Amino acid sequence: MRTRSVNRLWALGGVLCAVALLAMGWFFLISPQYARTAGLQDETATAQTRAAVLQRRLSELRKQNDDLPQYRARLETDRAALPTESDLPDFLRGVQSAGDGTGVSVKLLSVGAATQLTAANTKVYSLPVTLTVTGAVANVERFLTQLQQEQRRAVLIGNANLAAKDQGGAVELGLSLQIFVAPPAGG
């Protein structure tokens, strides 16, 4: 009987060892593999989502690339409005020409010293100009339209003072404006 008891004990011990080995195998071998597989599946899902977003962005960029000639033409127009040199004589001739074309008299009062402006890591220089325009109200209005919208150089009017010049309907307009210069890239 004692042998039977010992055999049972060995059988029970063997079963317990087998269960213990299975549990240890599960915790140390199988469970980490499941965790690793779940992690890789999460990474795959994230990569697929990111790939879809990048694919959509790529298609948007391809559409924009089709419009590249229009963007370059716009850049040239904008670059002409913000030249790399002050070219003040040319600007003043353009203002005088605009005055002649609209029937007003333009007199330059002063040109100030350039000041540096910094915006979005870009250096731009501002050159203050003060001038007086004399003529009929309608002609002065056409001159202002010409100055702000039709000439190629960007002009910012900071101050305008209008006064009647005489009984004939002529007015005198004092303008304080700024023209801008952007140094060439890398300059």
Image (cartoon, rainbow, N blue to C red):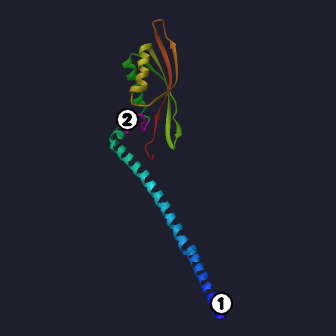
Nearer the N terminus, badge 2 or badge 1? Answer: 1
**Residue 151: percent from left, percent from top:** 39, 27
Q: Residue at x 56, y 74 (%)?
A: 26
Amino acid bearing label 1: Ser
> Which residue was labeled with disc 1?
5
Q: Where 133 sits versus 187, above or below?
A: above
| Residue 58 in view, yes or no | yes
**Residue 29: percent from left, percent from top:** 54, 75
> Which residue was labeled with disc 2?
77
Number of other residues with Cα within 10 Å of mark 2, as a class: few under 14, some 14 to 19, many 20 or more: few
Residue 79 is labelled as none
Q: Where 60 sits versus 78, above or below?
A: below
Q: Which residue is drawn at 49% across and 39% down?
A: 124
**Figure disc tally:** 2
Q: What element carries label 1?
A: helix
For the N terminus, the image quarter is bottom right
Q: Where 58 sits versus 145, above or below?
A: below
What secondary structure predominates along the stretch shown in magenta?
helix
Residue range in magenta is: 75-85
| Residue 136 in view, yes or no | no
